[in-house]
Amino acid sequence: MNPTMDPAKELMSPGHLACAGCGAAPAMRWALEALGPRTIVVMPACCWSIICGPYPHSALRVPTFHTAFETGAVTAAGIRASLDMQGLQDINVMVWAGDGGTFDIGFQALSAAAERNDDIIFVCYDNEAYMNTGIQRSSATPAGAWTTTTPGGKIRPKKNLVEIMAAHRIPYAATASIAFPDDFISKMTKAKGIKGTRFFHVLATCPTGWRIPSSHTVKLARLAVYSRAFPLYEVEDGERYTITVHPRDLPLRDYLEPQGRFRGLTKDQIEGLQEEVDRTWNRLTRLAGWSS
Amino acid sequence: MQRKSGPDGALPPGSITFSDMSWNRTGSWRYLKPKFVRKFSPCSESCPAGNDVEGFLFLAGEGRYEEALAKILQESPFPGVCGRVCCHPCESACNRRISDDAVSIQGIERFVSQFEPSRPPQPGEPREEKVAVVGSGPAGLSCAYHLRRLGYSVTVFEKEDVLGGMLCLGIPRYRLPRRVLNRDIDRILALGIGLETGRRVGKDMSWDELLAGRDAVFLAIGAHAHVGLKIEGESCQGIMPGTGFLKKVNLGLPAALGRRVAVIGGGNTAMDCARVALRLGSRPVVVYRRTREEMPAIEAEVQEALEEGIEFEWLTSPVRALVDDGRVAGLQCTRNRLADPDDSGRRRPEPVEASEFVLDADTVITAVGEAVDLAVLPHGLKVEKGVVWIDSWGRTSMERIWAGGDSGPDQRMVVHAIGAGKKAALSIHATLRGNDIEGIAEPLRIGSSGSFSMERYLQGEQGGAVPVREVVRPEQINLDYFEHVPRIVQPRRAPSDRVQGFEEVNGGYDKNDADLEAKRCFHCGTCDLCGNCWRFCPDLCIRSGDVPGMNLLDDFHCKGCGICAEECPRSAIVMEREL
Ligand SMILES: Cc1ncc(C[n+]2csc(CCOP(=O)(O)OP(=O)(O)O)c2C)c(N)n1
Ligand SMILES: [Mg+2]
């Protein structure tokens, strides 16, 4: 890390409206740090639409376009086309969407943009539910998690969106975490240098929705990576898988137990979830060439 | 940041924001507030000399060796000595042990001791009062050193012709080369200290004579009286006390050893005697009544003795010396087994019936402890359990007399003696100034061990993070930020080579190894500007402070989430309730 530690140099201002301990806030900070001031942010409806602040104020010191829930990718594609026509190829266009605006309602527009290989960066900051409207489940909510619409815990597992995006054969898709800033920033810097659709899936802890103390945001994100619940890797050209952070030998239980949203899971249920995590991890290691 | 709408009005005003969100006082949401603090590291707390261990490791890790040495010299005048022969309680307390191995604090102290300090120690503003120090061992010289820095005029009385006490006459040169010892001693003497060598107070000069015209006396005469084995035949020729043997060798006098030397005891003196005997061409065997685990010697000393091929008879006690023509001709011994623990907490040896045997020996060196020579003490001075009675500030039962080191109740280790001398210096100073020592010492304490900081006394509290009087516990370290890095072992000469003479065994770190080893320090309780708090803050509330080693908080915006405190690797941020 290179601590210049001067908030005045950041592209995001304090005073924003995120809850205390919000994981989506540092994610935005680091994305803008990597991309720089010549960036336009496109924001479909999500927590960040609020975090950014009310008109005529904006916590982002770069142009920001608020758009409808389902239209993040296509709005970005339109802005890109306009910039290209003006010869402004050096400006980055970054969609900043929640998991609802990516995995669910935003998915059609995202898939279409990826199929066209539009020259945009799409970042999904995944807090694993519709948090802005009061913790409703999304297809990114993991199995076992409580939300207001899954009071007994969600049954189906989380959708594997990075693999879906890789299947579009886009040049770059990666996972990232708010517990691993160096990994996050180096992936974003790498993506900046690539043309075409670049997709980021960032696990961004939500203390409010996950039922954890605000101080444990980074700690839980770290446990997600170390326990393999959320592995950090990248996929280039839809094929080349690279695991970028080594997990540690931690049981999934260590990640689930501190979270209120997983309270009430039985031992058997946790074992079932562990098996699912192992299966997904084994598949990833095969794809990354760690095992055969 | 204010933004202007398009000068030509090309954009509708409604699409343009006018400012960022900095105006919004999100600090009002908060009920807990982070505070940058400085806590005590367990290494510093456990150093009897009160060294700011974390502080000098930080400087050493930055390559600022001269400053690191100056930092050590604030508390102890013996970096060269302690870098070699200290029993390093700091390393036993090191929090890094929960991750891999303790930092080799001693190795780094040794490395920086070869430089010149950035700020050489200075005598304090001259004061009227005169103090005599009796004994020039580590306790006496440490006391003299600190008293000079406090401005007193000091005279050291030494019965021998050489200075250093046990450092010079006890410890063999392969552990502590004379040039290293002399460098430390010369630095102390450079403060301007009077010397009277070859005069034994209590014998060649009376205590009254000493006290006349002096405001205080620090008595640090050590423990040099022989403690015998109390076995039959002990007074025959060929049986000698270990300290006397080491002294002879250290003074270059002939030692008259036989071919087969039995060394009785399990402490550092026993290890020294055996290894010196080996180097003089004899074949030593160490006889100790308990097992290797209970040996009080520093572990590395035992290890090195074993490497050199020294034999050990553990669980063995001598019962009778076999005498032939007035000379020792063997040692009748018994085997022991370990029974329940005694007062010292170690398991008590108990003879095994009918296990006696004769150990071949034509020389016996006894190293079972030393006693204080009570005959030379001032008349009427209170003695308890064979040592000079002192209170927790080194005051004896007599006015104007302080005591410490091996002649007092302290642990008989070099660093404890250094600490005792320093403590007495502050205590003498408080008394001579008419102040209450507790009042002076309270803000100087390092945790609860009794160690204190002379640097803080002489220089006042350093700016920066708020000191809190708490020692960082291992569970307060965020181990996720520390990779496993094994301790670097200092190079030692091969056993076959080192037994040839008295060249130093340990080679010490080179610059590269010293750098790597110093960087293994966790810096428990002290910000090292790693930047985690700044990096993770969701509200951009941390910025670099003007004082090095201290970040600043944006109070107006901080929501009090507590991530900074949680992610601080070294527990240098605490969350405080705000009203
Ligand atoms: C078409 C449409 N349906 C519903 C909404 C209401 N709405 C606003 S934000 C949101 C949830 C967003 O969830 P997610 O994308 O996960 O982002 P988060 O709030 O969790 O950051 C919803 C349902 C909307 N704005 N538009
Ligand atoms: Mg969401």
Image: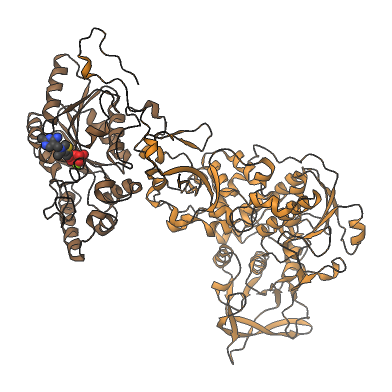
Residue B428 coordinates in the image, percent (x, y): 78, 53
All told, the count of numbered labels is: 0
Q: Is residue B405 above or below residue B531?
A: below
Please name the residue shown 32% across and 39% down the image: A181
Q: Is residue B62 above or below residue B181?
A: above
Residue B375 coordinates in the image, percent (x, y): 85, 70
Please name the residue shown 27% across and 30% down the image: A53
Q: Residue furthest bottom?
A: B354
Please name the residue shown 57% across and 49% down the image: B53
Q: Colour of chain B?
A: orange
Q: How is the image coloured?
A: by chain
Residue A165 coordinates in the image, percent (x, y): 12, 38
**Horizontally, is B72 left or right of B127 in the view?**
left
Q: Colour of chain A?
A: brown
Q: Is residue B393 above or below residue B256?
A: above
**Quadrant of the image for the N terminus of chain A?**
top left
Where residue A253 sits, quadrant-wise, is bottom left
The front one of A64 and B189 is A64
- Could one spot residue B457 in this view of the protein? yes
- Could one spot residue B205 in this view of the protein? no
Query: Ligand 2 quadrant?
Result: top left
Residue B119 coordinates in the image, percent (x, y): 67, 37
